């Protein structure tokens, strides 16, 4: 079940134990993300969805951190762009991801790397 967190984002990474974000209700103006498959052993497709008019030239960055807070991946992207991150080189475990722009964090969530 989707929760709305105090940071004004729609996500499943706000302490409810969810691992994949949920699409907001029709008419909801919140930013939301997808990260799938989750868990994964080889790749994760990420996308930041933003309703309405967004600056399509804005540079966003996806940061992925391990549970010790170390940045293990940084990729530049944009709004509503689907892209794949190879996670085969990362050890099994939980990771936190954040989408950031020049003003700070836009969205964040959790992913799990699970090796076979």
Image: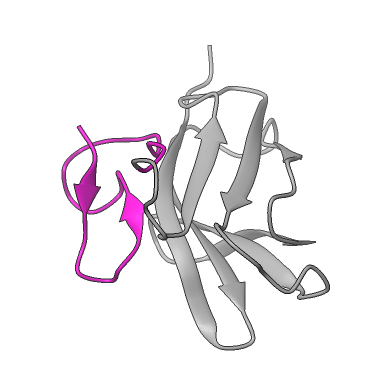
The residue most toward the right is 57
Residue drawn at (55%, 57%) of the image: 51
Residue drawn at (46%, 51%) of the image: 32
Residue 88 location, quadrant:
top right
Q: Is residue 116 above or below residue 78?
A: above
Question: Where is residue 38 drawn, in percent x and y?
Answer: 47, 27
The residue most toward the top is 116
Front residue of 3/27: it is 27
- Whether residue 95 appears in magenta in the rendering, the answer is no
Q: Main secondary structure of the magenta part?
A: loop
Q: Which residues are magenta?
A: 1-24
For the N terminus, the image quarter is top left
Residue 8 location, quadrant:
bottom left
Question: Where is residue 95 drawn, in percent x and y?
Answer: 44, 48
Residue drawn at (21%, 61%) of the image: 5
67 left or right of 42 in image: left
Residue 9 location, quadrant:
bottom left
22 left or right of 45 in image: left
Question: Where is residue 101 drawn, in percent x and y?
Answer: 63, 78
Question: Where is residue 105 drawn, in percent x and y?
Answer: 48, 75
């Amino acid at each position: 079940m989707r929760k709305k967190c105090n940071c004004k984002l729609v996500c499943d990474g706000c302490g409810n134990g969810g691992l994949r974000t949920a699409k907001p209700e029709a008419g909801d103006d919140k930013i939301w993300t997808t990260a799938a498959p989750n868990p994964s052993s080889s790749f994760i497709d990420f996308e930041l969805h933003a309703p309405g008019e967004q600056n399509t030239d804005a540079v966003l960055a996806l940061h992925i951190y391990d549970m010790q807070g170390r940045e293990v991946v940084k990729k530049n992207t944009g709004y509503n762009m689907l892209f794949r991150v190879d996670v085969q080189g990362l050890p099994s475990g939980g990771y936190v991801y954040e989408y950031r722009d020049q003003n700070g964090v836009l969205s964040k969530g959790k992913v799990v790397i699970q090796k076979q």
